[in-house]
């Protein structure tokens, strides 16, 4: 597939802080790449460099075979951007806002077509300040699609949307990339990444620490199952210490509140050993479940923390 975006060895520092440390990325025609990472991992700085909003200290960025630094104006005619915190003039109507964005490009959709794409025909003459949070998100998405971009940057596109509206956006984005266009997505919703992404890149401490399709990452990092359990015990950390002599793998089990989470390709074997060891030291399992590993399990295992942690 044709490469729409290629970034090589991107680096960016702010004083003594290295925000991005040698990142390589590629987005191909017809695919969605989800860039995931905890807050402070460097993903926002990376995306801002790819959008031309920040200048890398070193490294190269090409879009459509053109150097972003030298050809930014021409490149941006073929790019759509939806920022996480979009601020537009709230007194304009949705129709006026879309017409304004259309005027920035040599080629654009008819405003009525853009309105229909996101299901806002009945809000065309409403001011932005009169829209609900979800309706505003759809209006902002319509602005990013007005020039029929070959490459679409989406930063948290479905934040605040109800489940029905989220699925409308997902369907629209699938259609968009299905026309041999590309999407670079950042999201805090792991189900969204699993639904939309053909490939996932996980960023931490300014580096890409894992990359692949969602299923490849789940299989490679987690195996297939997650064992989640807790004990009828006032102190989970003390329970861990009691079990360590018999179950050395308890050292690597993630403790989330009162619950332990073990990601393993041998979850059922681990459960049998856990039952035996717990009974031997007088611990009682209070609740447990085994479920299929997800991207969120991959993320937590690789970074050791929730995607929403600061």
Image (cartoon, grey):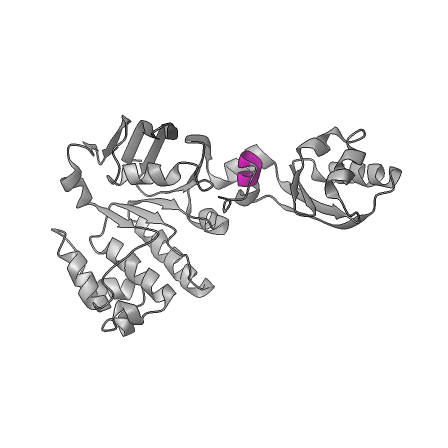
Q: Nearer the viewer, residue 191 or 131?
A: 131
* Count of numbered labels shown in the rendering: 0
Within the magenta stretch, is there residue 248? no
**Residue bounds of the magenta highlight:** 298-303
Q: Residue furthest front?
A: 15
> Which quadrant of the view contains residue 20?
top left
Residue 68 place in picture, x, y as percent: 20, 34
The reply to whether residue 136 is in sight is: yes
Residue 32 place in picture, x, y as percent: 37, 44
Magenta region, main secondary structure: helix
Q: Nearer the viewer, residue 90 or 106?
A: 90
Q: Is residue 202 above or below residue 16?
A: below
Give the residue at x 22% y 69%.
Answer: 93
> Which quadrant of the view contains residue 102?
bottom left
Give the residue at x 39% y 30%.
Answer: 17
Q: Nearer the viewer, residue 126 or 198?
A: 126
The reply to whether residue 3 is in sight is: no
Q: Quadrant of the N terminus?
A: top left
């Amino acid at each position: 597939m044709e490469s729409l975006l290629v970034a090589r060895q991107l680096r960016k520092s702010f004083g003594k802080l290295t925000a991005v440390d040698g990142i390589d990325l590629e987005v191909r025609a017809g695919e969605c790449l989800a860039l995931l990472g905890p807050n402070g991992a460097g993903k926002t700085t990376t995306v801002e460099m790819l959008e031309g909003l920040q200048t890398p200290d070193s490294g190269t960025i090409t879009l459509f075979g053109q150097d972003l630094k030298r050809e930014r104006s021409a490149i941006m005619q073929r790019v759509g951007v939806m920022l996480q915190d979009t601020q537009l003039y709230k007194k304009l109507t949705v129709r006026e806002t879309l017409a304004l964005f259309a005027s920035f490009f040599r080629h654009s959709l008819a405003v009525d077509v853009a309105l229909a794409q996101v299901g806002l025909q009945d809000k065309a003459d409403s001011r932005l300040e009169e829209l609900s949070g979800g309706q505003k998100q759809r209006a902002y998405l319509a602005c990013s699609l007005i020039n029929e971009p070959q490459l679409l940057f989406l930063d948290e596109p479905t934040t605040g949307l109800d489940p029905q509206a989220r699925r409308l956006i997902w369907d629209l984005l699938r259609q968009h990339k299905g026309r041999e266009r590309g999407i670079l997505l950042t999201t805090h919703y792991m189900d969204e990444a699993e639904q939309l992404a053909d490939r996932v890149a996980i960023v931490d401490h300014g580096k890409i620490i894992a990359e692949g399709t969602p299923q490849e990452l789940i299989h490679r990092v987690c195996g297939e199952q997650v064992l989640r359990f807790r004990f009828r015990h006032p102190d989970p950390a003390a329970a861990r210490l009691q079990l360590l002599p018999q179950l050395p793998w308890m050292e690597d089990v993630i403790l989330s509140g009162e619950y332990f989470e073990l990601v393993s390709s041998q979850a059922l074997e681990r459960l049998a050993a856990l039952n035996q060891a717990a009974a031997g030291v007088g611990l009682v399992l209070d609740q447990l479940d085994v479920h299929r590993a997800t991207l969120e399990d991959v993320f937590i295992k690789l970074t050791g923390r929730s995607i929403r942690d600061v």
